Amino acid sequence: MDNREELIQKITEMVLEHWNRLSADPYQVPVGISARHVHLSRDHVEILFGAGYQLTPEKSLSQPGQFACKEQVEVCGPKGSIKKVRILGPERKQSQVEMAFSDCRILGINPPVRTSGDLKETPGILLRGPVGEVSLKEGVIIADRHIHMTSEEASWFDVSDGDRVNVLVPGEKAGVLGRVLVRVTSESRLDLHVDTDDANAFLLRQGQWVTIRKDDAR
C-alpha cells in the first residue's frame, strides 16, 4: 500500500468513526486539551530570539494553519516563573499568554477568564528568551472554554457563534462543563478546547468524545 492509499484509508476510517458517533448521539464533539502556551508578535519574536528570526513549526494543531513551535520561553511573574513554555504559531498582532489557574498561582498573578484576543485590562508578564526579554504590559488570560466549529456544524448542532452551551462529560469523574462558548468560523475544525485544569478535574483525555447540551447554559 503506497502513501496515498494509506492516507485515503485513514481519512475513511476517521469519517466512519465520526459518522458512527453522530448516529449514536448527534451532539458529540471531540476534546482538545490546551496546555499553557504563548503567542508572539513579530517584534517580540525578534527581541526574544534575534533579528530576522523565524519560528520553527514542529507539530500541526487541531485548528487549520495553527502549529506548535520548537521554540520555548520562560514566563516570569512576581512570585515565580515557569520555564519551557511552548510558543504556538503563526505570529499574531499582539503577544498573548494563556495559562491555567494553577499556573497563575505559581506565577503570582490573577488574570481573568477571556476569549483569545480579548486582552484589554489583563495582567502583564515578563517573557525571557535565549537572546532577550519582553515585558508585556497586558496579555495574560485564562482561556475561556470554547468549541470550534464551521457554520455547517453549527447548523447541525442548532447553535450560533457566541452561544453558550453545556457539555456533558462521561467517565469516572463525570460532570458538566458549563457556559462553553461556541466559536464559528469558515476554517474551523470541530473541537472542544479546555485547559489542563479542566482536563484534570474531569479526567478528560485528548480526543475523547463529549456531548453538547444547550439547556440552562446562560
Image: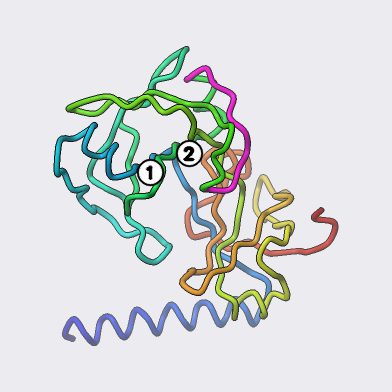
Specify whether 131 is left or right of 111: left
Q: Position of residue 104 (x, y in %)?
A: 52, 25
Q: Residues within 10 Å of mark 2 (few under 14, many from 20)?
A: many
- Residue 60 lies left or right of residue 138; in this view the side is left
Label 1, residues with CA under 10 Å away: few <14, some 14-19, many ≥20: many
State the residue position of label 2. Answer: 98
Res 200 quadrant in image: top right
Residue at 56%, 45% (x, y): give it.
118
Q: Earlier in the sequence, mark 1 or mark 2?
A: 1
> From what the image shows, is residue 185 above or below residue 13?
above
Indicate the position of residue 162 as horizontal and vertical percent values: 68, 61
Whether residue 112 is in magenta: the answer is yes
* Figure quadrant of the N terminus: bottom left
Q: Residue at x 54, y 69 (%)?
A: 185
User: Please, what is the three-letter code of the amino acid marked with disc 2?
Assistant: Glu
Q: Nearer the viewer, residue 160 or 2?
A: 160
Structural distance between the alpha carbons of marks 1 and 2: 8 Å
Mark 1 vs mark 2: in front:
1
Secondary structure of the residue carrying numbered label 1: strand
Q: Residue 216 occupies which quadrant of the picture?
A: bottom right
The verdict on residue 24 being magenta is no
Does the residue at mark 1 contact the one at mark 2 (Cβ under 8 Å)?
Answer: yes
Tell me the residue at 43%/15% (across/down): 80
Q: Which residue is mark 1?
A: 39
Q: Which of the pair 203/139 is nearer the observer?
A: 139
Residue ID at (37%, 81%):
11
Q: Identify which amino acid the numbered label 1 is placed on.
A: His
Left or right placement of residue 147 versus residue 15 in this view: right
Q: Secondary structure at mark 2?
A: strand
* In the depicted structure, whether residue 95 falls above or below residue 157: above
Magenta stretch in the rendered image? 107-116
